[in-house]
Image: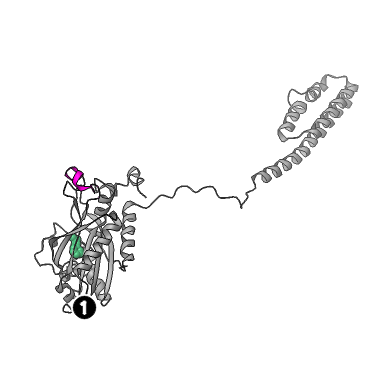
Amino acid sequence: MIERIGQIRAEAEAAICAAGTTAGLEELRVRYLGRKAELPNLLRGVAELDPQERGAVGRAANETRQALETLITDRGAQLELGELRERLAGDRVDVTLPATPPAPVGRLHLLTATRREIEDVFCGLGFTVVEGPEVEFVHYNFDALNHDPAHPARARTDTFYVEAPADPHGGEVLLRTHTSPMQIRAMEQQPPPIAIIVPGRVYRRDSDATHTPQFHQIEGLAVGEDVTLADLKGTLLAFAKAIFGDEREIRLRPHFFPFTEPSVEADVSCFMCADADAHAPRCPLCKGTGWLEILGSGMVDPNVLGAVREHGYDPERHQGFAFGLGVERIAMLKHAVPDLRLFYDNDLRFLRQFG
Ligand code: PHE
């Protein structure tokens, strides 16, 4: 019996020392010390042995079990350390490797892209970009812009008025209905000559497929001593070509705005049926007219210059042009967007088509 214990010990010690992995070592622990293993069985049977044999066999088996347990623990610690080192070496980050491609970060909203494109065109023509408040005094939105006191846009059914601290000009406060108030504010801040564009949000009490209560405009203003209607037409033509293509023409139609005289609406020749003769009658974009309305404009009314007379603008000496365009309208025409509300639904299937 003692001899058998010695054999088991020698065999187990050799196997434990040779174990290459912690998993392999665990198998050996089960094989030599587990519930069904020979040595523990032997120990359990000690009680039935001869009293003379009992002491020696029990001691030998116990010693062997303890020795094997210690050996397994020590070998286990060694193997674990080795395996940890291997894992660390394998996981080491090589910071010189190219980074994993970043997740797509999205794109500009079509309105932002269109605004920037338009800004680029006018900056190239010498205009600078300025911005103004969306909550505005009636003075800047209507009065200084030569609106008749009975002008319909002043009505509460058309325009959002807000409760706000008293206006130093003695009037009410509203959400600006157009970017034109910045004509006055900019001229108050900068003597002539001036050439600015004003991108920004505007608000009107309107809501259907072609109107949202909030939309975007870009105002333009150029005033000097010899700025003429021809300059307006040349500027708008350059704009139309840059946005809608080099082949485009523009035409001006008489119109009315309180703050320009004369006032004109500008149309750009339809780019969808450029070979007009053949396709114009059926063109879905221009409805067969060959022309698309793009903006309102005109020569700055002397009364508007009079409102900023004390800031260096003399209606007798200075003259210039102004225009106002809808960013949504330009984007809809250029990209054939059928419904204005698509811009604000934030449906990714729509937004992903652009940019
Ligand atoms: N403010 C006008 C509008 O919103 C557009 C415009 C601007 C017309 C400048 C003439 C000159 O309809």
Given residues 190 and 161, the one toward you in this image is 190
Given residues 3 and 302, the one toward you in this image is 302
Which residue is under mark 1? 313
Q: How is the image coloured?
A: one colour
Residue 147 location (% of width, % of height): 13, 67
Q: Is residue 256 left or right of residue 332?
A: left
Residue 274 location (% of width, % of height): 24, 49
Q: In this view, does 309 lie above or below 51?
A: below
The amino acid type of the residue labelled 1 equals Tyr
Q: Can residue 161 be seen in this view?
A: no
Number of residues whose C-alpha sits closer than 10 Å to that of mark 1, classed few (under 14), some (14–19) or many (20 or more): many
Q: Give the range drawn in magenta.
A: 270-283
- State the image quarter where residue 9 is shown: top right
- State the image quarter where residue 11 is shown: top right
Q: What element carries label 1?
A: loop
Q: Which residue is at 63% across, 50% downward?
A: 94
Residue 305 location (% of width, % of height): 18, 75
